[in-house]
C-alpha cells in the first residue's frame, strides 16, 4: 500500500510534465496528415501558443533558412541528376526588362469567346486568391495590399492551371497525327515544351511556399474542370483555344508586372534580399549578380510573354495545314522571325502573312 501511495503522485506529475509534448505530437501528426505528407516548418504546428488558421490563409511563404526539399530526387545512388529534354534559352538582362504588358484586340466571334472565357477565369482566380486591383488613388488602401504570401498563392494557383493547355493541345495533336498518319508540322513539341515550362514555374515557387490542404483541393478541382473543358474545346475549335491561352498569358504578364512593381516600391520587404532557389538558377541559367527574387519574377514574366506570343501566333494560322513558325529553319535568317528566344518578341503575335 505504501508503494502505491508513493508512486501515484509521481505518475500524476509525470503526466503533467509530458502533456505539452503529447499535444505537440498529436498536433504535428494531424497536420502532417492534412498536408498529405509534406513537412512543414511553420511554428503553429509545433507550438501550443499558435493555432492553425481557419480563415483565408491558403499558403504561407517559407523563410530561406527553413526551406525544405518538398520534392526530393529519387533515391538512386548511381545517378547524380536528371537531364532536361528541353533546354531553356538564355535571356539577357535587357530582354527580360523589355517585356511589356499588351493586349490583342478581339476581331471575330472566336476571339470574343476566348476573351470572355479568360475574363470569367480571371474573376474566379481573383476571388480564390483574394486579389483586388486598386483603382487610381486607392493604391495605399489596406484592403488592396498584396503580401508575399498572397502573391505566392496567386502564382501557385496560376501556374497549376497554366500548365494544362500545352499538354492537352500537344496530346490531341499527337493522337491526330497517329490517327491520320500525317506529320504535325512541328506543333507538338512546342506545345509540350510550354506545358513543361509552366510546370517548372510551379516547382520553383514551391521552393518558397507550401500549399495547405485547402489549396491542394482547389488545384485538384480546378485541374479536373479545366482539363476536361479545354479538351472538349480543343476538339471543337483549336484556334479559339490558342487565342484563349494567348489572352490568359496576357493576364499572367500583367500579374507578374504588378508583383514586380510591388517589390520595387518596397511593399514586399521579405523579398528584397531573397535569393532565387537553386532550381531556378539552373533552369534559367541565371548569371551571378542577377539571382534575386526580382530577377526570378522577370524571368518568369518573360516566359509568360513568350507563351502569349506563341499562342496568339498559332491562333492566326490554319490549324491543320500551316507549319509551326517557332520550330522551322528560315530561308533568310537575317530578317526578324519567330524563334525560341525573346529577341524578336511580338506582343500580339505574328500574323499569318508574316510567317507562312
Image (spheres, grey):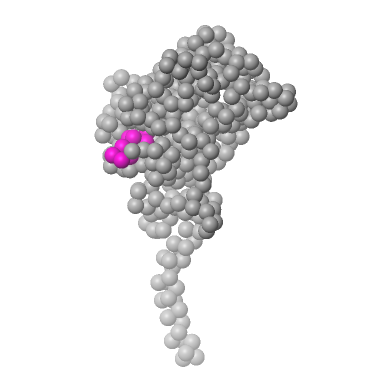
- The residue closer to the viewer here, 258 or 337, is 337
User: Would residue 99 be visible to someone looking at this image?
Assistant: yes
Residue 128 coordinates in the image, percent (x, y): 48, 33
- Against 54, is 331 above or below? above
Q: As drawn, which residue projects farthest toward the left? A: 266
- The residue closer to the viewer here, 205 or 340, is 340
Asked if the stretch drawn in magenta spans residue 149, the answer is no
Residue 317 lies in what quarter of the image?
top right
Residue at (45%, 73%) from the top-left corner?
15
Residue at (57%, 39%) from the top-left corner?
220
- The residue closer to the viewer here, 271 or 310, is 310
User: Would residue 249 be visible to someone looking at this image?
Assistant: no
Q: Which residues are magenta?
A: 288-297
Residue 50 coordinates in the image, percent (x, y): 38, 54
Residue 24 lies in what quarter of the image?
bottom left
Q: Quadrant of the C terminus?
A: top right
Amino acid at each position: 500500500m505504501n508503494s502505491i501511495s508513493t508512486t501515484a503522485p509521481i505518475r500524476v506529475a509525470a503526466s503533467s510534465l509530458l502533456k505539452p509534448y503529447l499535444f505537440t505530437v498529436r498536433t504535428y501528426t494531424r497536420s502532417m496528415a492534412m498536408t498529405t505528407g509534406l513537412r512543414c516548418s511553420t511554428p503553429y504546428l509545433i507550438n501550443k501558443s499558435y493555432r492553425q488558421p481557419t480563415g483565408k490563409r491558403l499558403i504561407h511563404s517559407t523563410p530561406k533558412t527553413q526551406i525544405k526539399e518538398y520534392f526530393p530526387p529519387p533515391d538512386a545512388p548511381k545517378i547524380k541528376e536528371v537531364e532536361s529534354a528541353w533546354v531553356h534559352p538564355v535571356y539577357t538582362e535587357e530582354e527580360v526588362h523589355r517585356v511589356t504588358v499588351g493586349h490583342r484586340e478581339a476581331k471575330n466571334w472566336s476571339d470574343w469567346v476566348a476573351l470572355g472565357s479568360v475574363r470569367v477565369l480571371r474573376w474566379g482566380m481573383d476571388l480564390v486568391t483574394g486579389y483586388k486591383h486598386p483603382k487610381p488613388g486607392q493604391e495605399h488602401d489596406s484592403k488592396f495590399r498584396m503580401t508575399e504570401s498572397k502573391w505566392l498563392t496567386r502564382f501557385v494557383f496560376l501556374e497549376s492551371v497554366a500548365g494544362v493547355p500545352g499538354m492537352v493541345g500537344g496530346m490531341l495533336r499527337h493522337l491526330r497525327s497517329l490517327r491520320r498518319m500525317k506529320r504535325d508540322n512541328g506543333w507538338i513539341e512546342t506545345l509540350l515544351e510550354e506545358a513543361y515550362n509552366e510546370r517548372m514555374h510551379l516547382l520553383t515557387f514551391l521552393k518558397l511556399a507550401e500549399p495547405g490542404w485547402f489549396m491542394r483541393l482547389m488545384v485538384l478541382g480546378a485541374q479536373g474542370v479545366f482539363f476536361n473543358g479545354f479538351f472538349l474545346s480543343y476538339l471543337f475549335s483549336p484556334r479559339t483555344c490558342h487565342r484563349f491561352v494567348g489572352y490568359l498569358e496576357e493576364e499572367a504578364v500583367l500579374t507578374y508586372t504588378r508583383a514586380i512593381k510591388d517589390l520595387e516600391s518596397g511593399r514586399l520587404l521579405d523579398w528584397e534580399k531573397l535569393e532565387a532557389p537553386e532550381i531556378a538558377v539552373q533552369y534559367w541559367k541565371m548569371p551571378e549578380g542577377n539571382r534575386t527574387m526580382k530577377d526570378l519574377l522577370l524571368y518568369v514574366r518573360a516566359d509568360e510573354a513568350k507563351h502569349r506570343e506563341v499562342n496568339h501566333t498559332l491562333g492566326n494560322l490554319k490549324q491543320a495545314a500551316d507549319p509551326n513558325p517557332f520550330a522551322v529553319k528560315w530561308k533568310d535568317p537575317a530578317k526578324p522571325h519567330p524563334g525560341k528566344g525573346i529577341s524578336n518578341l511580338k506582343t500580339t503575335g505574328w500574323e499569318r502573312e508574316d510567317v507562312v
